[in-house]
Amino acid sequence: MDKTPRFEWMTEEYTFVERSTDWFWAVGLAAVALAVVAILFGDALFGVVIILGAASIAMLSIRRPETVAIAIGERGIKIREVFYRYSDIPAFWVDERPDGNELIIMTKRFFLPQVAIPLHEIDADAVREFLKEKIEEKEMREPRYHKILEMIGL
């Protein structure tokens, strides 16, 4: 990473939502009901997978988000300890929304190639102008799985 990044800020890895006891009861009851149905249809293994999935969702929902360091410099973008060179980022988009601006970058990774980075108080226009000199600006939207996970509360 560059010695002096052009933009640098801290953000939480996701927005934490406090869950009520009723939410956990609903997840648990839905999982048990689906597992029972799976067992009645002769697929006990799927029933076990449903229970394990619900337990994983419950455990993830109580985990507090970590604070993540973001830096944009002359050679690339650093998120935590992962450095993305501009040659590994084919395109970017600054998604300006009322609930907060986001920088979306497309990487060359096979698994989860889009990365959404909240900009918070960083000037979205300044980031856009800086990145336009380095990589192509291409309209993108936040990946659907992000929205699904937000609806579930993860």
Image (tube, grey):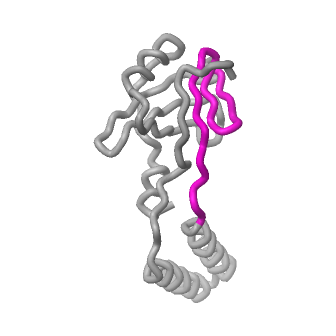
Of residues 33 and 74, the one nearer the viewer is 74
Q: Is residue 71 magenta?
A: yes
Which x, y percent locates residue 108?
63, 29
Which x, y percent locates residue 49?
65, 73
Which x, y percent locates residue 29?
50, 85
Residue at 59% x, 21% y is 5
Quarter of the image where one finds residue 137: top left
Residue at 64% x, 75% y is 46
Q: Is residue 148 magenta?
A: no
- Residue extending furthest toward the top: 133
Residue at 47% x, 54% y is 15
In the rendered structure, the answer to whether residue 98 lies left or right of residue 105 reads left
Quarter of the image where one finds residue 100: top left
Q: Which residues are magenta?
A: 63-85
In the rendered structure, the answer to whether residue 41 lies left or right of residue 102 reads right
Q: Is residue 92 above or below residue 97?
A: above
Where, quadrant-wise, is the N terminus in this rendering? Answer: top right
Q: Is residue 134 above or below residue 107?
A: above
